[in-house]
Image: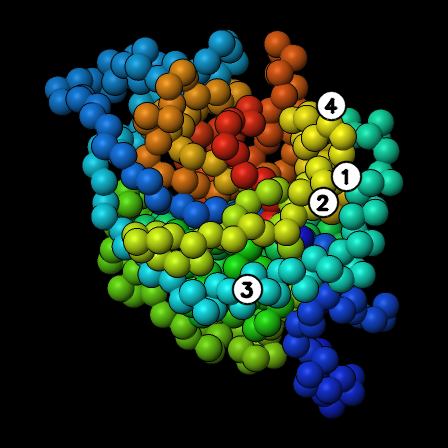
Amino acid sequence: MDHVRFRKKDHAGRDGMPEKERRGRSGEQSPCNRNRWLLITAIVLSLIDQRKFEFHMEGMSSTSLTSKVKSDFPCRTTSSCSAKFNKFGVKNRSYGFKYTRNSTAVREVMEQLQTFFDSDAMKRHIQELADYPESSLPTHFDARLKWPHCPSISRIPNQGGCGSCYAVAAAGVASDRACIHSNGTFRASLSEEDILGCCEVCGNCYGGDPLKALVYWVNQGVVTGGRDGCRPYSFDISCGVPCSPQTFFEAEKSRTCIKRCQNIYYQNRYDDDKHFASLAYSLYPRSMTITDSDAKDVERAKVPTIIGHFNSTANPPLSLEQIRTILKKEISLYGPTTMAFPVPEEFLHYSTGVFRPAEGFQSRIVYWHVVRLIGWGQDDDGSHYWLAVNSFGEHWGDSGEKRSTCCPRILCGDAILW
C-alpha cells in the first residue's frame, strides 16, 4: 500500500503562500493550518507476463458455457463463490506490449522514496500503526459503512479500452482518502486521465506503477476528474466487460497530456485545480525495475516499505497474519488502499462470493491487475478475504465488487501523504 498526504493547491495572493510552498516537499510535513489527507494506493505492473491459454467454446450455448466455466475453473473449496460465462473474459493469446523506461527518471523516483521514508512524517506514521491496538480491528470491515459521507468509496469505475488499472485505482483511493480526512467537505474525484497523459514515468495504456503516480502527485499535483471535473476520463468503455487488451493499442495512440480543463462549464483553470502530496511511500515489500524488462541485464532496486521496517525489527519475521493486521490497521485508520495481483482466466468469469483461484492458477495468468481495497471479512469456513472494488464497471462480477482470499504473490501497498 502506498500512502500520501495531500492538500488543495494554495495560491500566492489568495493566502500569501509562495510558489515553492505549493510544490511537494521531500518528507517535510505540511503546517497544521493546511488540509492534510492520508492516502493509500498500490503497486501494480499490469498486463505483463502474458501467457497463452486455450479455451474452446465454438457452438456452445450460454448455459453450456457457464457450466464449462464452472467445471474448468472451479472456485476452490467454497460453496459461496459462483461463476458465470463472460464472453469478454476469454484471453487466449499474448499481446506483445513493449515497455520502455527512462532509467534516470526511475532512479530519481527511488531517491525520492528513500528521502520520504527517512522523514519525520514517516516515523510518526509508523508509530501510529504500531500503537493502534489489534483488538480494535473488527472481523468484518467495509469502508463504505464507516465513511458513508464519502460517495467516491462506492463508485465503481470502468477503465474501458486502456490498461489503466494502476491509475484508476490510485486516483480512486486518492479521492477516498481526501474525502475521509476532510470529513466529507472534499468530495471530488481526482483524475486518472491526468496521470495517464502527463506522468511519463508512471506508465501508459499497457500498464504502469501507482507508486510512481504518487511521487508524481508530490512533484506535479493532480487535477480533479469525474464527469464534472477538470480532466474527465476519455477512453472508450463500450468495448467489453472487461475490454480486451487488443483495444489498448488504439487507446495508447490517443493518450496525450492536455494541460487545460476539458469541460467548458468547469470554473477552475488547470493550474488552479491541482492537488498536491507531500510524501509518498510503500507499505508492502516490493522492488522497482530500473531498466527495460527486455534489457540484457535487468536492473531492479528494493523500495523502502512499512512492512519491511516492521519485519526488520521482528524476531521471528512477520507471519502472514501479522502482515494482514498491518494492512487492516492502515485501511481502518485512513481508508481504502490498492491491491495488485496476478489474474488467472477464471477471475474474468467471477460472479459472486469469495473468489479463490483453482489449483495451478499460475499457468493461467493472463495479466497483472490492480484494484481498490475497501475492507475485509471472514468466509463461512473461517477463512480471511479482502473486499475490493474492481475497474471493469458495474456489470462485471458482484456489481463491480469482488471478495477474494489473499492469493500468493499478492501485492498490497503503496501510499502517499498530502
Q: Residues within 10 Å of mark 2 (few under 14, many from 20)?
A: some
Distance from label 2 to label 1 (Cα)? Answer: 7 Å
Residue 85 at x, y = what percent?
Answer: 31, 23
Tell whether 128 sits left or right of 340: right
Q: Whole-Å distance between the Cαs marked 4 and 1?
A: 27 Å
User: Residue 88, image x and y in percent?
Assistant: 28, 34
Q: Is residue 328 left or right of residue 358?
A: right
- Which residue is drawn at the image coordinates 72% and 66% (left, top)? 27
Which image quarter is the C terminus in? bottom right
Of label 4 and label 3, which has the lower sequence position?
3
The amino acid marked with disc number 2 is: His
The quarter of the picture where residue 374 lies is: top right
| Observer able to see residue 145 | no
Please rate how many residues cluster around mark 1, counting C-alpha atoms within 10 Å: few if below 14, some from 14 to 19, many from 20. few
| Mark closer to the chain start, 3 or 2 | 3
In this figure, which residue is indicated by the disc labeled 1? 313
Q: Nearer the viewer, mark 4 or mark 3?
A: 3
Q: Which residue is mark 4?
A: 139
Secondary structure state at the residue bearing disc 1: loop
- Residue 220 visible, this orientation: yes
Look at the numbered discs 2 and 1 and tell me whether their residues touch, using CB distance below 8 Å. yes
Measure the C-alpha gap from mark 4 to mark 3.
37 Å
Where does residue 293 sit, x and y in percent of width and height?
A: 35, 52
Splitting the image into 4 quarters, where does residue 69 fall?
top left
| Residue 217 horizontal/vertical position (percent) | 59, 66
Q: Indicate the amino acid at tag 3.
A: Val
Considering only vertical position in the picture, is 259 above or below 119? Answer: below
Q: Amino acid at mark 1?
A: Thr
Mark before the other along the chain sequence, 3 or 1 = 3
Contact, CB < 8 Å: mark 4 with mark 2?
A: no
The residue to which callout 3 is attached is 109
